[in-house]
């Protein structure tokens, strides 16, 4: 079972795929698979950003409660 890439790894792979698409390097036969891969990677990035945002908000809320005490 492979683990999900880190955020930076996912972004780097997305950029690499997009560069190949833009330059015409990708064969039409693999284009669909690459587009699906980009969609998957974007979903991973979206989840990681939402998790990070939630964790940061918890820290901020904790700091604000400490200031109110």
Image (cartoon, rainbow, N blue to C red):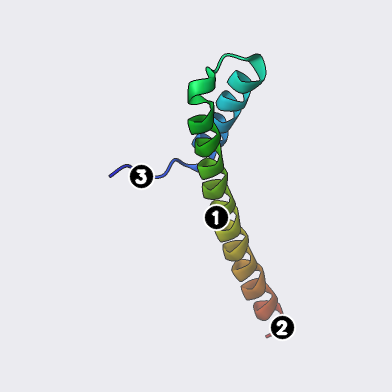
Q: Is residue 2 shown above or below 20?
A: below
Residues marked 3 and 2 touching at CB (< 8 Å): no
Q: Quadrant of residue 38?
A: top right
Image quadrant in which the C terminus is located: bottom right
Please rate how many residues cluster around mark 2, counting C-alpha atoms within 10 Å: few if below 14, some from 14 to 19, many from 20.
few
C-alpha separation, residue under disc 1 versus residue under disc 2: 32 Å
As drawn, the label of residue 47 is 1
Residue at x-position 54% and y-position 21%: 28
Instruction: State the SS at label 2.
Output: helix
Residue at x 52% of width, y 31% of height: 32
| Residue at disc 1, secondary structure | helix
**Are the residues at dot 1 and dot 3 in contact (C-beta closer than 8 Å)?**
no
Residue 36, image x, y percentages: 52, 38
Give the labeled residue for mark 3: 3
> Which residue is at the front of the view, 25 or 32?
32
The foreground one among 62 and 24 is: 24
- In this rendering, the label closer to the viewer, 1 or 2: 1
The residue lying at 51 percent from left, 48 percent from top is: 44
Which residue matches tag 2?
Answer: 68
Q: Nearer the viewer, residue 45 or 24?
A: 24
- Using a 10 Å C-alpha cutoff, classify the residue at mark 1 as few (fewer than 14 neighbours), some (14 to 19) or many (20 or more): few
Q: Disc 1 or 2, which lies upstream in sequence?
A: 1
Residue lying at the far bottom of the rendered structure: 69
Label 3 SS: loop
């Amino acid at each position: 079972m492979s683990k999900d890439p880190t955020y930076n790894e996912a972004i780097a792979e997305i950029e690499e795929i997009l560069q190949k698409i833009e330059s015409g390097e990708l064969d039409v036969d693999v284009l669909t698979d690459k587009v699906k891969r980009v969609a998957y990677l974007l979903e991973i990035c979206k989840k990681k950003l939402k998790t990070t945002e939630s964790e940061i908000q918890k820290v901020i809320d904790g700091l604000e409660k400490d200031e109110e005490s």
